[in-house]
Image (cartoon, rainbow, N blue to C red):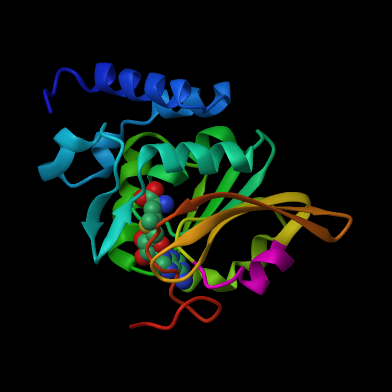
């Protein structure tokens, strides 16, 4: 990537996302603020503004920008919300959520990814994020309930602890299906009932944990 041009490439990507249906001005605004090239390995920085997932180590990926935008739009994070993210990965999604909400709790199973993500966000001056290492399928009851929950890895079914930790009126976005293909689901909790919307077919790395997939 031409180091002088990341802003122009970012603007082009955000305009493409808008043209392809991302309508939330807040989501588009947040994507203009966060330099995705800092969240990918330096060797593939030139690909940071292509709409594709990229490897970040440990067999994991940073999701493609259009999927991150869609999930963020579906979650509708509000300025007063506490958000739980499962699967910190590079920290890119957490950075967007941090700009759009009051506080973010993000859980990652690989300590090295969590440490790198925390460093990236602090370098950007983003401080309203709590980084935890562990099995995110258990959620983190200590800060529950969460107004929004985003799971960025594929689950065989929605982990029960996450449904329990979702606030009334809250929204949960999660890919659910088999290891190789899933459907992105948006669940909304109202009066302790849940309304499910199946949004789009997708492919995520597996959510590995007690309420996810076993380690292979
Ligand atoms: N949100 C990330 C980003 O913006 O870069 C992308 C995440 S990547 C598609 C999915 C992540 O979920 C991986 O980093 C993986 O290690 C993590 N993961 C998988 N199972 C997990 C679990 N049970 N708890 C926490 N993290 C998990």
Taking the magenta stretch, the answer to whether it contains residue 64 is no
Q: What x and y, as percent, mark residue 129? A: 50, 48
Q: Is residue 85 visible?
A: no
Look at 84% across and 60% down and name the residue there: 193
Taking the magenta stretch, the answer to whether it contains residue 159 is yes
Rendering quadrant holding ligand 1:
bottom left
Q: What x and y, as percent, mark residue 52? A: 29, 42
- Residue 153 to residue 6: above or below: below
Work out which quarter of the rendered image holds the N terminus and state it.
top left
Q: Is 144 displayed left or right of 47 in the figure?
A: right
Look at 40% across and 59% down and name the residue there: 204
Picture quarter containing residue 56?
A: bottom left
User: In the orientation shown, which residue stands out farthest toward the right?
Assistant: 191
Picture quarter containing residue 122?
A: top left
Q: Is 165 displayed left or right of 74 in the figure?
A: right
Q: Is 158 displayed left or right of 61 in the figure?
A: right
Look at 23% across and 54% down and name the residue there: 55
Q: Nearer the viewer, residue 180 or 31?
A: 180
Q: Is residue 170 visible?
A: yes
Look at 33% across and 83% down and name the residue there: 216
- Residue 73 to residue 30: above or below: below
Counting every numbered tag in the picture gives 0
**Residue stretch rendered in magenta on the structure:** 155-165
Q: What x and y, as percent, mark residue 165? A: 70, 64
Q: What x and y, as percent, mark residue 27? A: 52, 29
């Amino acid at each position: 990537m031409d180091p002088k041009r990341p802003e122009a490439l970012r603007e082009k990507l955000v305009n493409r996302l808008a043209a392809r249906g991302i309508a939330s001005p807040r989501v588009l605004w947040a994507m203009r603020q966060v330099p995705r090239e800092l969240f990918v390995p330096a060797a593939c920085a030139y690909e940071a503004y292509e709409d594709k997932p990229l490897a970040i180590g440990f067999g994991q990926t940073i999701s493609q920008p259009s999927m991150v935008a869609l999930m963020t739009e579906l979650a509708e994070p509000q300025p007063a919300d506490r958000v739980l993210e499962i699967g910190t990965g590079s920290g890119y999604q957490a950075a967007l959520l941090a700009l759009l909400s009051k506080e973010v709790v993000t859980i990652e199973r690989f300590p090295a990814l969590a440490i790198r993500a925390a460093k990236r966000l602090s370098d950007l001056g983003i401080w309203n994020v709590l980084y935890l290492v562990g099995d995110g399928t258990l959620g983190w009851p200590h800060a529950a309930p969460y107004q929004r929950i985003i799971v960025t890895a594929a689950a065989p079914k929605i982990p029960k602890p996450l449904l329990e930790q979702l606030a009334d009126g809250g929204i949960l976005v999660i890919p659910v299906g088999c290891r190789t293909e899933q459907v992105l689901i948006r669940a909304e909790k109202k009066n302790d009932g849940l309304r499910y919307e199946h949004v789009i077919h997708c492919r995520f790395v597996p959510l590995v944990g007690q309420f996810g997939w076993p380690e292979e």
